[in-house]
Amino acid sequence: MSAVERVSSPGRAAPADSASVAPSPRAGGTADDDILLQVTGLTVARKDAPSVHIVDDVSFTLRRGEAMGLAGESGCGKTTTALAVLGLLPGGLRRVSGELVFHGGGRARPLHRLGGAAMRRIRWASISMIFQGAMNALDPVKTVGSQIAEAITLHEPKVGRTAVSRRVGELLDQVGVPAKRSVYYPHEFSGGQKQRIMIALALACRPELVIGDEPTTALDVITQAQILDLLGELRRELGLSLLLITHDLAVLAQACETIAVMYAGQIVETGSVDTVYRDPQHPYTARLLDLLGAHDAPGTLPKPIPGNQPRPNARPSGCRFRDRCTFATDRCAAEAPDLRVIGEGLLPHAARCHFAPWPDGAVDRPDRSDRLDGQEVAP
Ligand SMILES: Nc1ncnc2c1ncn2[C@@H]1O[C@H](COP(=O)(O)OP(=O)(O)O)[C@@H](O)[C@H]1O
Ligand code: SF4
Ligand SMILES: [Mg+2]
């Protein structure tokens, strides 16, 4: 794992345009027996090019009942991280190092050491995933009820037919689809209802952790808000933990208490949603949050961050964000920044930037020349 430096935070005011944030009910830290999933130093590489790390030394902790968001632009490694947790990496990729320990069902299980059969028992039953665009993956020639029933009997073969059909009804009810519609086929439902059915499928075997990979991306804004509300309600009712993967920080703020921002395969900032949205300490996070603020001014469109995320085999030396960072200095090209812990919390506030913590408010303004007069801002 990278070395982690501990530094003090100057404490800064909230940016005027920051999004509304979810409450952080357990900020301040909880006991270790609250940990559900511990990912330490996860590195995933291409099999045909082992030095190309798609996911690079990723570590995070997810606690029971917590909703954590994994954010970042397309291609930064979010889905690969989730697939590694589930032991479902595509054939071209391999976990080269790192530990994934799941503390569900009252015991610690090292997922990284489990074989195929053991992982299959954990998937759905303990950890389930709602895949990106999953609602289109429902089998068109089977009723939705029979598809949910199949998921239950596959993992719990001893459950009788009557009990299965009762559970199917309860699950549909839980996600707001009338139980009597279990005999309908997927094409007879709207996109939002299909996504609700996918959530019922994910809950079919009463998992402790649900991973949602862009579960609302294909939906209109109103349906998206309804699905996020539903996930929140289910989480509270069932005590679930949620790992929500999304490029959309507004979605994340609505659904999560903690956030890990990824860039070019690495985590570049972590913390409670409340802290990170009010006081971002990585220029990349600050620019992502600017995109949210741009929606507030009538008639303006959000300005994308100039440049593109580097491909995994063409990352710059030093800081991977430096080609797009208005604050970059010679040091940023010469030296790769560590993830520095700035403050405590459910997920400690940390940023992978040489200059974190930033002088009051400095990171919030994208144009460096505007306010720094060409001066280097190293603390
Ligand atoms: N099977 C694969 N073989 C080679 N590269 C892959 C494979 N799957 C994903 N990648 C690459 O890994 C990077 C991260 O992909 P992904 O985890 O899907 O990102 P995200 O979910 O953040 O959009 C991308 O550059 C993608 O091209
Ligand atoms: S280390 Fe340098 S290039 Fe990287 S985010 Fe910080 S200021 Fe920008
Ligand atoms: Mg993805």
Image: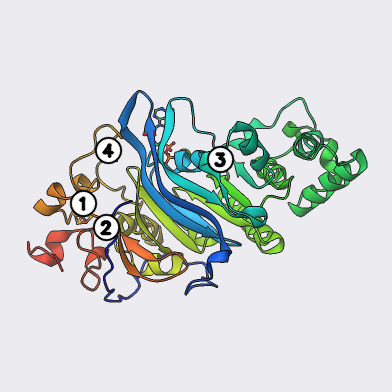
Q: Is residue 64 above or below residue 83?
A: below
Q: Which residue is mark 1?
A: 325
Where is residue 228? Give x, y as percent.
Answer: 60, 55
Q: Mark 3 or 1 closer to N-term?
A: 3
- Residue under the image location 46 percent in, 51 percent down: 39
Against 99, is 369 above or below?
Answer: below
Q: Which mark is residue 283?
A: 2
SS assignment at label 4:
loop
Residue 296: image location, x then y, percent = 40, 62
**How many other residues sit within 10 Å of disc 1, few (<14), some (14-19) or many (≥20)?**
many
Within 8 Å: ligand 1 and the Cβ of disc 4?
A: no
Q: Nearer the viewer, mark 3 or mark 2?
A: 3
Q: Is mark 1 within 8 Å of ligand 2?
A: yes
| Amino acid marked by disc 4 | Pro
Instruction: Please say if 213 is above or below 355.
Output: above
Q: Do the numbered discs 1 and 2 sit on residues whose CB atoms are within 8 Å?
A: yes
Residue 310 numbered mark, or none: 4
Q: Secondary structure at mark 3?
A: loop
CA separation, marks 3 and 1? 34 Å
Q: Is residue 242 left or right of residue 234?
A: left
Question: Dot 3 surroundings within 10 Å: few (below 14), some, or many (20 or more)?
Answer: many
Q: Residues within 10 Å of mark 2 (few under 14, many from 20)?
A: many
Mark closer to the chain start, 4 or 1: 4
- Residue type at numbered disc 1: Cys
* Label 2, ligand 2: CB separation under 8 Å: yes
Q: CA distance from mark 3 to mark 2?
A: 31 Å
Q: Secondary structure at mark 1?
A: loop
